[in-house]
Image (cartoon, rainbow, N blue to C red):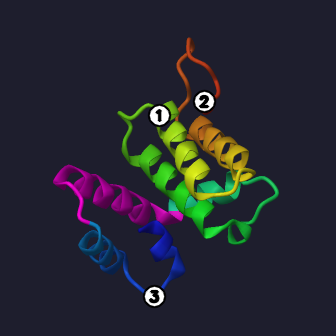
Amino acid sequence: MLYALEMGGQTAHQVERWYLDAHPLEPDVRERAGRLLDQAVTNNARIETLIDRHAKGWKRERMTIVDRSLLKLAIGEMLEEEHQPLPVIINEAIRLTKKFSQPEAISFVNGLLNSVAQELRQPDAGSAATFSFRD
């Protein structure tokens, strides 16, 4: 849904309605997908600011739509779902990156999300300072 929204021409509500009509999903999955979309859309300005600040040497416009969409999805979840452990959010984003993007995007997405995570939530004294995907 975020990819379609990035392509432009429709509102978030229109994209959500189109996608959910075209893809029969279990009610709990439908609800989660809608919530994740809403988190990314509601926080779009803040998410784009975070991406711009942490994408060292990259302009958001140069990123692929897939990578931007995955970053927005993960950062939206980081901002709204404080009960969700950051490594879980990052690992899921990396799995999606592996599935839908180019191999070289994996380290970029991982590094950017790590950097954003550091800014958003300071780790406890006993926990690791960085979060990364492990196969």
Asked if residue 99 is positioned above or below residue 15 in the image, the reply reads above
Residue 113 image point, x, y percent: 61, 44
Q: Nearer the viewer, residue 122 or 130?
A: 130
The amino acid pointed to by label 3 is Gly
- Image-based side of 45 in relation to 18, left or right: right
Q: Position of residue 75 (x, y in %)?
A: 51, 50
Determine the secondary structure under disc 2: loop
- Three-letter code for the amino acid on which mark 2 is drawn: Asp
Q: Does 124 appear above or below 94?
A: above
Q: Which mark is residue 88?
A: 1
Q: Which mark is residue 9?
A: 3
When the figure is inspected, residue 33 is found, relative to residue 77, above or below; the finding is: below
Q: Is residue 26 magenta?
A: yes
Q: Which residue is mark 2?
A: 135
* Helix, strand or loop: magenta stretch: helix
x, y percent for residue 71: 56, 55
Q: Quadrant of the N terminus?
A: bottom left
The residue located at (60%, 48%) in the rendering is: 98
Label 1 vs label 2, nearer the camera = 2
Side (left or right) of 68 relative to 39: right
In space, the residues marked 1 and 3 are separated at their CA atoms by 32 Å
The kind of residue on which mark 1 rests is: Val
Q: Which residues are magenta?
A: 24-45
Of mark 1 and mark 2, the one earlier in the sequence is 1
